[in-house]
Image (cartoon, rainbow, N blue to C red):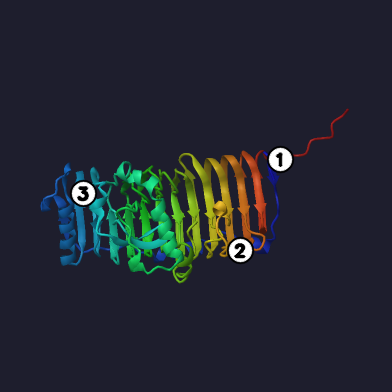
Amino acid sequence: MNLKYLLLFLISCAGFAQKSDFPTAKVDSIVNRIQVPVFPAYQVNVIKLGAKGDSVFNNKAVFDKAMALCKKKGGGTIIVPKGIYKINGPIHFVSNVNLKIEEGAKIKFSDNPKDYLPLVLTSWEGTMLYNYSPLIYAADCTNIAITGQGVIDGEGGKIWKSFKAKEGPGKNLSRDMNHNNTPGKDRKFGEGYFLRPQMIQFLNCKNILVENVRIENSPFWCLHLLKSQNITVRGISYKSLNHNNDGIDPEYAKDVLIENVTFDNGDDNVAIKAGRDHEGRANTAMPSENIVIRNCNFKGLHGVVIGSEMSAGVQNVFVENCKTAGYLKRGIYLKTNADRGGYIKNVFVRNIQLDQVEDCLYITANYHGEGKGYQSDISNIHFSNITCNKALESGIVIQGFPDKKIKNITLNNIEIKEAKNALSNENAENVLMTDVFIGNRATVPTAVSKH
């Protein structure tokens, strides 16, 4: 359907409409069980250990010492006071530590790739492998936090940015290893492969808080929540506009609350993932699930994305009370293809205000037209109370396969004031629309004209 103005007004049956209501009780139960970590009373100020906030001195050894002291004491808070702290290499967390970056403080990482060796276990676009250490890295930790009003600067716009044009062979090798089930110990990348590290990554961690800090200039994804659970991200802000600067990437993540975040990213604001292809499908016991995103300001490429790496499955995602602070290419974007398998189900989105977008709501099972043999299941997707001022391309897009249809989509109280293409709906069943307006709302019909 390729009409500039379209009025859709369908009355859905009451039985199905009830199931599509936003499940507030379910959201409350998830939020109530996500507890923020509590830390021992011990505190260490990096200045007292010899740190210099002069933007020149290499504070790597000082921060390592602060972590070691906290480990010896059973945990505590590392205080980073006002100043610019150059660190030539990563910060590696231990359990029970709060890294508190105070107002006026900035941690500025080096951009020399050699500083992020030796290799650590990480993930790159949905495939587990060994690569450069993320700039802030926590593996197998419990009770950890990054807090305060300060800034984390990844210095990603120079050397790291140049890696993008050279990453193809390394990226393809990682995907071949995924498809061929290459043993993990043999998946070694780093120098010569040009796969950029994430800014902050939590791997196999529990009880995480990231609060109020500002994230700038990441080399790659900004905040990667990998195989972790019980996570609160709130009050943080971004200015990170390099290649692939996703804001928050929950991957194989469980029980996640993302709220009051101000995004300004060079890529997706929130991108929910769950592994890629063969490796992801082998991890079906670890879907990404129970993720609440609310009261956020979107700005960047896309607002909330699920996929395209989602092969272990994504379920129980709740997005509400968010708006845009600038242009988005797509507002809400669910994407997978026939290489992925897995499923996307039980997604509820309500009370979203979008300004100008390319596409407002987009669900596709044929992302990039790639793949074969592993079509994904997409079902039970519910949108309500969404407004958009202008869609430069499409208002609503739903794309399934003839032999694997997208099922059970509800759209209730959607108003897109202007769209080049109103609606594209193919290979889907049980698509129910109530009070959906694209273009000008129709009023009473005009009388027959007299000749």
Q: Earlier in the sequence, mark 2 or mark 1?
A: 2
Closest to the observer, 302 or 317: 302
The residue indicated by pointer 2 is: 19
Q: Position of residue 379 (x, y in %)?
A: 59, 62
Closest to the observer, 201 or 128: 128
| Residue 313 in the image: above or below residue 51 | below
Residue 262 visible in image:
no
- Type of the residue with mark 3: Ile
Mark drawn on residue 87: 3
| Residue 132 in the image: above or below residue 240 | below
From the image, which quarter does the C terminus lie in? top right
What whole-number distance in Å separates the C-alpha atoms at marks 2 and 1? Answer: 29 Å
What whole-number distance in Å separates the C-alpha atoms at marks 2 and 3? Answer: 52 Å
Pointer 1 local density, CA inside 10 Å: few below 14, some 14–19, many at least 20: few
Q: Position of residue 235 (x, y in %)?
A: 36, 50
Closest to the observer, 99 or 85: 85
Q: Earlier in the sequence, mark 1 or mark 3?
A: 3
* Residue depicted at x 45% and y 67%: 180
From the image, which quarter does the N terminus lie in? top right
**Disc 3, SS:** strand
Q: Earlier in the sequence, mark 2 or mark 3?
A: 2
The residue indicated by pointer 1 is: 442
Nearest to the eye among marks 2 and 3: give it: 3
| Residue 21 in the image: above or below residue 151 | below
Query: Total marks drawn?
Result: 3
- Type of the residue with mark 1: Ala
